[in-house]
Image: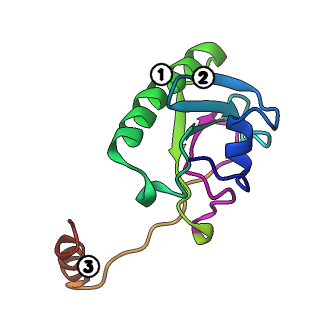
Amino acid sequence: MPNEDCLFCQIIAGEIPATKVYEDDKILAILDIHPVNPGHALVMPKKHFVNLLDADEETLAAMILATQKIAKAVLAGLGYDAFNLELNNGRLAGQIVPHLHWHIVPRTAEDGLQHWPGKSYKAKEAEEVSQKIRENIK
């Protein structure tokens, strides 16, 4: 069901203009209005889900298949060799619009983007963390 307060639901309903790059019965993809690089696209389900954890399996399957098609087209159409597929899940992770969406961010050697810095686990910490995760997989 659409959420009338959701920006992306309003775009999907045609109430707010957007530059579409792909659409089928379940998925809409548009160009990001503040792209990292030209071709930066947002892939979203037409059905409203707040985030990845809220979505059903059918929608997630449709999203990844559409994302593969769109990413191939971005690379081929604009001459890129690489892209990042990004999901910001929750406000602390950088999710601005509370509607599930993935960013296809085409990359160039000159774009200045860097991968975030990694950390190391302390002794036995990795096993403790992995055990907690395994215990909560449903």
Left or right, 55 with respect to 103, comes to left
Report x, y in % for residue 42: 62, 38
Q: Amino acid at mark 1?
A: Lys
Q: Which mark is residue 129?
A: 3
Report x, y in % for residue 14: 76, 32
Q: In terms of secondary structure, what is the magenta stretch mainly?
A: loop
Which badge, 1 or 2, comes first in the chain's sequence?
Answer: 2
Q: CA distance from mark 1 to mark 2?
A: 9 Å
Q: Identify the secondary structure beneath mark 2.
A: strand
Q: Amino acid at mark 3?
A: Val
Report x, y in % for residue 97: 68, 56
Residue 96 painted magenta = yes
Q: Quadrant of residue 111?
A: top right
Q: Which mark is residue 69?
A: 1
Q: Residue at x 41, y 35 (%)?
A: 64
Q: Identify the secondary structure beneath mark 3.
A: helix
Q: Is residue 113 above or below residue 16?
A: below
Q: Amino acid at mark 2?
A: Tyr
Residues in magenta, as a range: 93-113
